[in-house]
Amino acid sequence: MTINSEIFFKRAAAVFFVSLFITGAFIFSDYGIYWDEEVQRTQVGAINYNYIVTGDNTALLANFHKYYGPAFEVLLSAAEDVFDVTEPRSVYLLRHAICFFSFFIAAICFYLTCFKLFKKYSIALLGAVMLVLSPRIFADSFYDSKDLSMLCFCTIAAYTMFVFIEKQTIVTALVHGLLCGFVMDIRIMGVLIPIATVYLFVMQKKKKMLPFAVFLGYTLFSIVVFWPILWMDPINNFIEAFKQMSNYPVMGSTNLYMGENVPAADLPWHYLPVWIGITTPVLYSVFFIKGLFFAAKNIIADFRNTAHLHAILFILFAPVLAVIILNSTLYDGWRHVFFIYPFFILIAVYGFKQVIEIFNRERVIKTIVYSTVAYVAWILIVMIKDHPYQNVYFNMLAGKNLQKRYEMDYWGLSYKQGLEYIAENDKSEQIYVAVQNLPGILNFNMLSYEDKKRLIWTNNLGAANYFLTNFRNHPDDFDFGTSVHQIKVGGEKIMEVIKLR
C-alpha cells in the first residue's frame, strides 16, 4: 500500500466508526429482551448494587447467583439509578444502549490493537470491519450483558495489555490492571488476559519492574473492588466462585445439535468447533486457517519475536481446550466463549496480511483484496436483510432444515416483533396472548404503553386469542390454531403467531 492509500484507510476508519455509532443509535431499540436478561438485571446487578449503596448484604448472601461475576451488571444498575429510569421499556432500552456503546468502544480498541500489531491502517480497518460484520456478534452487542460484555472488555483489556507492554509506565499499568480486574469480575476466565500480560512481560528484553509490580497489585485490588461478594471474604469467596464456574449447576437442559437433543452436561467434543464453524462467515474462517499456518511457521522460525502471537493463540485456544477436556456444560451454541472471537479475527487478519505479502503479482493481490471486499459487502447485505435477527445467522456449511437440527432464536428475541405484529393488526380493546416460554412474557415490556394496555399475557391456552412460539425445545410445528404470521431467517422459521379464536 502507498502512503496515500494508507491515509485514505485512516480516514475511511473514521467514517466507518461514525457510521457504526449512528447506525447503533437508530436501531438499538429494535432488539427484544433475551431469556436471562431479567435474572441478570435483578438477581446479579440490582442485588449487588443495593449492597454497594446500602451496605446491607442480606439479599446478596441469600442469592443463588451471588458468585456470578457482577461487574457489568452493576454498571447497568447504576445507570438505571443515575438516570432515574423505572418504566420497564425505558429500563431495557437504556441497558441495550449501554451494551451497544460498550461494543462500539471495544471495536475502536480492536482497530487500535490491529494497527499496533500490523502497522497498517488498511489491515486495522479490515479487522474492525470483520469484527463488526459478524452477524451473531453484532446482534448480541445490543442486548447480551453476559457474553458480549465479556467480549467487549476482553477486547479493551487486550488493547491496554499491548500498550502496557510497549510503554511500561505507571499510568498504563494502572489502566491495564483496572481493566484486568473488571474483566475477571465479569467472568473468571478473564484471568487469561493478566496471564498473557505476565508472559509478554517475561518475553521482553527491557523490563521495568515497578510498573509491572503496580500492574499486578492493581489487578488484585480491582478484582476485589468490582466484585462486592469479595469484600466480605476475598480469598474464600473467590475460591467458591471459581468452584461454581468450574462446575456450574446443570438444570437438566438439552441442546438441539445436529438434529438430536443432547444433554447440556454431556456434549460431544466437537460441539464447540462445529458451532463456531457454522456461524462464522466462511471467508473469515478461511483467513483464520491461513493465519494459523503462518503463525505456526513464523513462531518456529523466530520464537522470541513472535510473543504477541503466543499471547493471542493462548487466549484463543485455552478456553476451547478447557471446554473440550473438562466436558464443560454449554447452552445454546458457543456464546459462552464469544470473548475469544476478537482473537480469532486477529489471527484471520494476520492470515490475510501474510497472504498479501507473499504474492508479488499486483493482479493476484487485487483479486484477493476485491474478493474480500465483495464478500464483506455481501455479509453486510445479509445482515441488513435479516435485521434484527442477525443472532440466527448460519453460513452455508450448516446445511438445510436448520429448524430441526440446531437451536434457532433460542433466547426468544423475536417475541418482540411477534407481539408488535398482533398489536398492529388486531385492534381489539383486549387481546389475550399465550406464549411458549419465558421470553414471550418478558417481551411484553418492550411494547408501547398503549399496546401494553391492550395485550394481556395469559398462561391459559383455552382463554388466549393468540399463541406465540420461538420453537425452543419444540422444533416441530404446532398442530392447533391458524398461523397468521411467521418470521423467517434464511428460509427457516424462528417465530410464529398462531390465532386461536
Image (spheres, grey):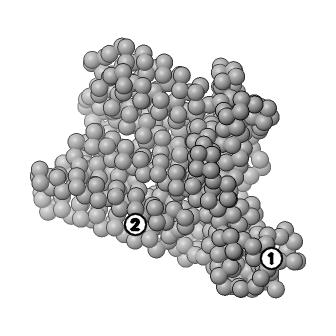
Q: Quadrant of the C terminus?
A: bottom right
The amino acid at mark 2 is Ile
- Whether residue 364 sits left or right of residue 447 in the image: it is left
Q: What SS does tag 2 mark? A: helix
Query: Looking at the picture, how far across and down is residue 270, in whole percent?
Result: 56, 49
Is residue 480 placed above or below 118 in the rendered structure?
below
Q: Residues within 10 Å of mark 2 (few under 14, many from 20)?
A: some
- Please identify, in this view, whether the residue under mark 1 or under mark 2 is nearer the observer: 1
In this view of the protein, which residue sits in the foreground, 446 or 133?
A: 446
Looking at the image, which residue is at 71% across and 58% down? 261
Looking at the image, which residue is at 75% across and 31% down? 56
The amino acid at mark 1 is Tyr
Query: Looking at the picture, how far across and down is residue 286, in whole percent?
Result: 36, 55
Looking at the image, which residue is at 53% across and 38% down? 319
Looking at the image, which residue is at 37% across and 14% down? 210
- Distance between the alpha carbons at the discs numbered 1 and 2: 39 Å
Is residue 232 placed above or below 425 in the rendered structure?
above
Query: Looking at the picture, how far across and down is residue 432, in whole percent?
Result: 80, 76
Residue 432 tag number: 1
- Find disc 2 in the rendering and name its residue: 379
Residue 104 in view of the camera: yes
Indicate which disc, 1 or 2, sits on the residue closer to the N terminus.
2
Residue 386 tag number: none
Residue 410 in view of the camera: no
- Whether residue 201 sits left or right of residue 489 in the image: it is left
* Quadrant in which residue 382 is drawn: bottom left
CB atoms of marks 1 and 2 within 8 Å: no
Query: Looking at the picture, how far across and down is residue 5, in whole percent?
Result: 15, 55
Q: Residues within 10 Å of mark 1 (few under 14, many from 20)?
A: some
